[in-house]
Image: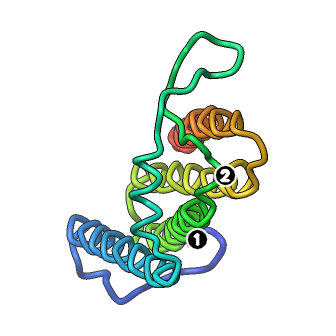
Amino acid sequence: MEKLGLKIDFGLGSLADKRKENLLNAIYVGSIFIILAVVYYIHISDNLWSDLVNFFTSLKLSVVPSTGLSLPAPANPAAHINLYVAAFQFALAVGILEIIILLLRVGFHSPVPRKAETIENIVFWLGASYLTITYLVNMTIPSEWFVFWAGIILIFGLALISRAFVLLAKR
């Protein structure tokens, strides 16, 4: 940012780098708890806790289409839309939080590996939120449950590659 003539100073210049990272970690963990509480509060009238219990009790082994492999899947995946919406809201909120943390890391001049980790988290959480709203909330056929999990594995790979590119660009 300084190369562009912009200098961000949060008044924390006197803090040691380890203290800055500890501060960012505390902000991150505290924000995750706040996000969990807000998502739960939004869905409290929908009885989210019962939906979560019902989801896990409805899991059964189902054959993955075009394979002989059996994996856990809800008996009726479309019956858990409220839970999927809450998962979408959580993933989206964490993705936005990760963007804020990245901006703070840039402002605090965090080490590049920490920024790369945050970029990896941004890709994962925003990708997970997209997949949740696309494949779970709008689920029309049960096989989309397995497509969702294949997509999560794909997003995880993309997140790792994004981290590698950031670390590579540092060199």
Examine the rendered structure and indicate whether residue 54 appears above or below residue 31.
above
Does residue 64 appear to the left or right of 55 in the view shown? right
Task: Name the residue carrying label 2.
Answer: 78
Structural distance between the alpha carbons of marks 1 and 2? 47 Å
Examine the rendered structure and indicate whether residue 60 appears above or below residue 58.
above
Examine the rendered structure and indicate whether residue 115 appears above or below residue 148.
below
- In terms of image quadrants, where is residue 10? bottom left
Residue depicted at 59% across the width and 59% down the height = 84
Q: Position of residue 134 (x, y in %)?
A: 74, 53
Q: Position of residue 128 (x, y in %)?
A: 60, 51
- Residue 169 at least partly seen: no
Callout 2: SS: helix
Q: Amino acid at mark 1?
A: Met
Circle 1 packing at 10 Å, graded few (<14), some (14-19), many (20+), is few
Instruction: Pick whichever of labels 1 and 2 is earlier in the sequence.
Output: 1
Residue depicted at 44% across the width and 67% down the height = 105
Circle 2 packing at 10 Å, graded few (<14), some (14-19), many (20+), is some
Task: Name the residue carrying label 1.
Answer: 1
Callout 1: SS: loop
Of 116 and 128, the residue lying toward us: 128
Q: Position of residue 53 (x, y in %)?
A: 39, 58
Q: Amino acid at mark 2?
A: Ala
- In terms of image quadrants, where is residue 130? bottom right
Q: How many marks?
A: 2
